[in-house]
Amino acid sequence: MADSADLQKAVGSGDGAWSATADGRGRGQLRGLDGSAVDPDRHDSFLPTVYLYDNYPGGMGQSEPLWHRQRELVKRARELVEACGCKGGCPACVGHAGRCRNHTACPGAARAGRAGGCVSVSLAKLQQLKRQAGAAPARPPRPAQATGADLSLDHLRSLLRVRGRGPEPVVRGDRSLPGTEIAPGLFFVEEFLPDPEVPPVLDGSFDRGEPVATGDVLFFDTESTGLAGGTGTRAFMIGAADWCGPRLRIRQLTLASMGAERDMLDAFAGWLQPHTVLCSYNGKCYDAPLLNTRYRLARRTSPLPGLRHVDLLYPTRRSYRGVYENCRLATIERHVLKIVREDDLPGSEAPAAWLGYIRGGGSALLRRVLVHNRQDVITLSRLLGWLAAAAD
């Protein structure tokens, strides 16, 4: 899949000096990095770059349907680029033909709809530039057509010029993680803390909502590989806490391998019920959308939409904006809840700790991330009680 903005750069020079974009009439036009127009007649030759997109809904990269139809894809893609008459490349041909309102005259657009809409490049323009420059350089011999027996993953990698696997990571230090390995590469930690002073119902007016039954509340927090969001950001740890009578139960899921993500998402979904009230700190803007994305990429139905979500960041800002230097959770717990963390690993270092472990490093820093995540969900339970009591 590709973002709509990326489609405007689907055709261009290999060094990124220019790309083909659509003008106001939907026709291809060359633009430089600064957005200025580029004269195609000045480029005697260039190294083209073509991106191959997977139109499978919700997919990314090379999907199984694309693998099974590779011969048809290459054949129709060649027909598409040879038929396109745009002078400077035609990004309007990329994707479904109906996406372009003013480009019905381009024969490539109609072919794109029938072929599944995937590739566009001005092959005619490339050939014209080569003729202007003189004799074209000798083309490398075309690889032999693969037979049915040769269609393998290695052959596909060679066609796509994908680099082979690198050396196995060197294991360094202690790699043990606390908890039980409930699935290959997925570790689960559970503990109970005494919390006898929790009332059965909390006043929800601090969040401008209905009263909150403490038995329905699930505090949750994620640790991820970055703050950018999107498909490239992965949640490698999910921490949750809920009240079980006079005790606070803390549960944590940690990924020790990339392949355990679906098991982690399934386990977290099992903790949620239709009456669950989610409670987080900035979870409405970050944690919940991140998990929704991971569920979608894993071909799972996200259990989060439809559940009531109490985000403690907003009432905290209303109460303490301008009182302290900021409203970060660490600041509020230190000044309001009088909780002081000792030897705490900052959340900004969590991605490096997990990536270092995945690449063969020790688990010392990742265990500190577990401690950090554990304290976050404990703080959420304390902060909810504080805000509800202040609203009485």
Image: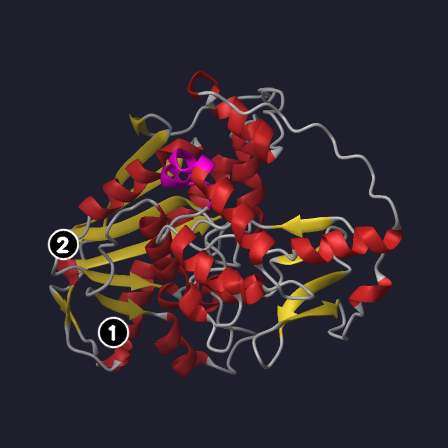
Work out whether residue 288 or residue 344 is closer to the camera in this orientation and state it. Answer: 288
Q: Earlier in the sequence, mark 1 or mark 2?
A: 2
Q: Height in image: 244 above or below 104? A: above
Q: Quadrant of residue 274?
A: bottom left
**Which residue: 34% across, 25% down?**
184
Q: Height in image: 197 above or below 135? A: below
Q: Height in image: 34 above or below 192? A: below
Of the two numbered discs 1 and 2 in the rendering, the one whose residue sits closer to the viewer: 2
Q: Quick one: SS at disc 2?
A: loop
Left or right of 152? Residue 28 is: right
- Quarter of the image containing the N terminus? bottom left
Q: Quick one: SS at disc 1?
A: helix
Q: Quadrant of residue 170?
A: top right
Position in image of residue 221 (x %, y %): 37, 54
Residue located beneath label 2 in the image: 273
Pointer 1: residues within 10 angstroms few (<14), some, or many (20+)? some
Work out whether residue 46 or residue 87 is closer to the camera in this orientation and state it. Answer: 87
What residue span does the magenta drawing correspond to? 61-71
> What amino acid is at disc 1?
Ala
Pointer 2: residues within 10 angstroms few (<14), some, or many (20+)? few
Left or right of 125? Residue 286 is: left
Position in image of residue 314 (x %, y %): 38, 76
Q: Which mark is residue 388?
A: 1
> What amino acid is at disc 2?
Gln
Work out whether residue 307 or residue 296 is closer to the camera in this orientation and state it. Answer: 296
For residue 45, say whether it is visible: no
Position in image of residue 291 (x %, y %): 35, 54
- Quarter of the image containing the C terminus? bottom left
Position in image of residue 234 (x %, y %): 45, 47
Look at the magenta stretch and give its main secondary structure: helix
Left or right of 221? Residue 158 is: right
> Would residue 62 be counted in the magenta stretch?
yes
